[in-house]
Image (cartoon, helix red, strand yellow):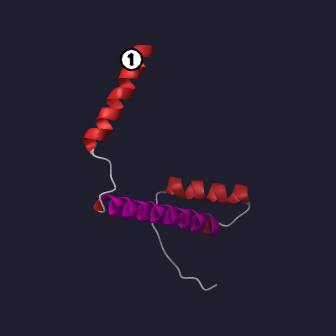
């Protein structure tokens, strides 16, 4: 697998935490940073796709009207208050 170099600037505290984590895992700092970056990018991509799907659903009229949601919530709160 080919690689490319990315340079970042970070505060010494975070750099120290990365170094400590790498040491405790018997891994390189590069491995820890690459794994963290991979997880971050995957999570952000997943969230963005979910948001796009939700917006598409709303654009197709598949959402629940605000008034209907509020009425349902008021019913739940009322039922909860009666039990309390």
Relative to the observer, which residue lies in front, 70 or 47? Answer: 70
Q: Relative to 47, is 70 above or below?
A: above
Instruction: Identify the secondary structure beneath mark 1.
Output: helix
Q: Residues within 10 Å of mark 1 (few under 14, many from 20)?
A: few
Instruction: Between residue 41 and residue 25, name the one nearer to us.
Output: 41
Residue drawn at x 41%, y 63% as measured from the top left: 48
Residue 75: percent from left, percent from top: 35, 27
Q: Kindly identify the residue that appears in the image at 62 percent across and 63 percent down.
A: 32
Task: Point out the image quarter for the N terminus.
Answer: bottom right
Give the residue furthest to the right: 26
| Direction from residue 26 to residue 84 in the image, left or right | left
The magenta stretch spans which residues? 31-58
Image coordinates for residue 77, horizontal then vertical, percent: 37, 25
| Magenta residues, dominant SS class | helix
What residue is shown with label 1? 81
**Which quadrant is home to the C terminus?**
top left
Q: Residue at x 50, y 61 (%)?
A: 43
Residue at screen point 60% across, 86% down? 2
* Residue 39 shown in magenta: yes
- Residue 20 point in image, percent of width and height: 64, 55
Q: Quadrant of residue 76?
A: top left
Where residue 41 appears, x then y in whole percent?
49, 66
């Amino acid at each position: 697998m080919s690689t490319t170099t990315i340079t970042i600037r970070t505060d010494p505290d975070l750099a120290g935490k990365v170094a400590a984590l790498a040491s405790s895992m018997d891994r390189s700092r590069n491995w820890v940073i690459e794994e963290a970056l991979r997880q971050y990018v995957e999570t952000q991509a997943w969230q963005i796709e979910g948001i796009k799907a939700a917006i598409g659903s709303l654009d197709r009229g598949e959402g629940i009207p605000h008034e209907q949601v509020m009425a349902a919530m008021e019913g739940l709160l009322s039922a909860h208050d009666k039990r309390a």
